[in-house]
Image (tube, grey):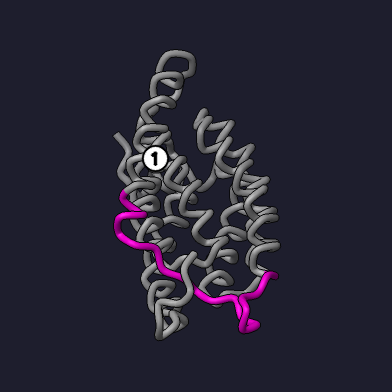
Amino acid sequence: MQSLPAQLADAWSTTSWTEIFAVVLAFAYLLLAIRQSIACWFAAFVSSCLYVWVFFSARLYMDSALNVFYALMAVYGFWQWHTVDKDGGHHVRRWSLSRNALAAAGILALSAVNWYFLSRYTLDPFPFVDSTVSWGAVFATFLVARKVYENWHWWLIIDAASACLYFAKGLYLTVLLFALYLALIVIGMREWRRSLPLTPAHAA
């Protein structure tokens, strides 16, 4: 049985250029999003289009469909970040714990439905995890587009689960990307927290 370094070396040698470009652009997206640069949505759009093919080839069908959504959300996010509040800015907002809890219940319900169909009609090896990660990411991406601070808490959970899922599927370069994401999420929390208004006037 090969050692982990040997497995990683073999995986790297077989990594497609499509996945490499998708990883680079996805990393650029997060760096730009932390800085609240609207250019992040251009990187997100191209990366998402590339990942549609990467995940479909890996038989992660929910992740493939999710990246179609990501591409559409990149357009929505670009438009949203162009809008302004009444004082001429586009502020970071907060969501209450109860609002996030309600969203979590909805995500679990949708994941249960997806789990049933994926386990019955596809070869997805991890149907419930795949579904939960995908629906959670749908919601978290919406929060990013609306500049809701709690998106970072959602991504911390989602990306940790995603890294485990992609490791099991042998997408090691994408695992590395998500490991870097986890470190950058902490930075994102700190940077966006500095942008929070001093009063609770700005609600999503």
Q: Residue furthest top?
A: 120
Look at mark 1 in the image and give the residue it sits on.
107
**Residue depicted at x 36% and y 28%:** 112
Q: Is residue 58 left or right of residue 89?
A: left
Q: What's drawn in magenta, residue-wise?
A: 82-101
Left or right relative to 128: residue 9: right
Quadrant of residue 54 within the rendered picture: top right
Percent x, y for residue 14? 55, 41
How would you rate the neighbour count of disc 1 (Cα within 10 Å): few for under 14, some for 14-19, many for 20 or more? Answer: many
Q: How far from the left and from the top, in percent, is residue 93?
A: 46, 71
Q: Quadrant location of residue 110?
A: top left
Q: Say which element carries label 1.
A: helix
Whether residue 119 appears in magenta in the rendering, the answer is no
Q: Residue at x 41, y 42 (%)?
A: 133
Q: Can the viewer see residue 166 in this picture?
A: yes
Task: Return the x and y of residue 174 as percentages of the image width and height.
Answer: 48, 50
Where 172 sits versus 110, above or below?
A: below
Quadrant for the N terminus in the image: top left
Foreground pick, 192 / 21: 192
Was residue 100 drawn as part of the magenta stretch in this picture? yes
Secondary structure mostly seen in the magenta stretch? loop
What's under tag 1, amino acid-wise?
A: Ile
